[in-house]
Image (cartoon, rainbow, N blue to C red):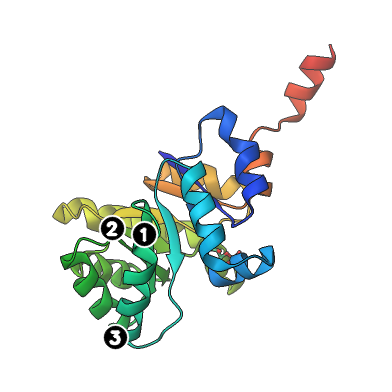
Amino acid sequence: MKFFLDTADVDEIRDCLPLGIVDGVTTNPSLIAKTGRPFEEVAKEICEMVDGPVSLEVVSTEAEGMVKEGKKFAKIHKNIVIKVPMTPEGMKACRIMTKSGIKINTTLIFSANQALLAAKAGTYLTSPFLGRLDDIGEKGTELIKEIRQIYDNYGFKSQILAASIRSPEHVKEVALFGADIATMPFKVYEQLFKHKLTDKGIKQ
Ligand code: G3P
């Protein structure tokens, strides 16, 4: 199972590097805006730090605009993956960019059928948003089980990237349910190391 950091903060990424367990990074326009730095500069720096996929999200809502943005982002570094939303226009853009060799991360997935559509459109990564399903009273991690089964039934190669992860419990459940990747905020990554009996054992 791969771990991605859901951040655009290069200090957080740097902190994790010595352990060698961060396999990629996911960002979105709000995370990049939070850094107060130019988009391309941050993206490039992240790509040079992490040897794995780095997702950058488009903001256009029409396929044509998404493809234009995606092609521009893809030139920044070979590890860039383009994040497009789960809409018909997003899936059109997914098909076009996939054909030209650009990898796609389909984001804002909230149902198994949406994950099926994304796989059929050739997405490289499928991002179900767990925390946001929990927010509306559903059990987000159940969606991972469903997508896993569907992808295995048909041999879809798209990787399930569990996103909108809010807690170590989410990480455990998505690992049990067969997600290929969990992308998490730095705070959750730090919490994974913690157990009160570990602290107590060290003191003893
Ligand atoms: O991985 C997606 C993430 O950036 C959104 O998380 O917590 O805003 O639902 P959240």
| Residue under label 2 | 124
Contact? badges 1 and 3 (CB < 8 Å): no
Where is residue 71 shown, x and y percent of the image? 31, 70
Most foreground residue, 204 or 31: 31
Where residue 131 sits in the image (x, y, percent)?
57, 63
Q: Is residue 109 above or below residue 178?
A: below
3 vs 2, front mark: 3
For label 3, the SS is helix
Disc 3 and disc 2: Cα gap in Å?
20 Å
Residue tagged 3: 64
Give the x, y percent position of residue 194.
Answer: 70, 33
Using residue 83 as the reference point, say whether residue 159 is left or right of it.
Answer: left
Q: Could you say which quadrant of the image residue 60 lies in?
A: bottom left
Quarter in which the N terminus is drawn: top left
- What label sits on residue 109 in the rendered view? none
Most distant residue in the bottom direction:
62
Q: Which residue type carries mark 3?
A: Glu
Separation of marks 1 and 2 at Cα, in angstroms: 8 Å
Residue at mark 1 to residue at mark 3: CA–CA distance: 17 Å
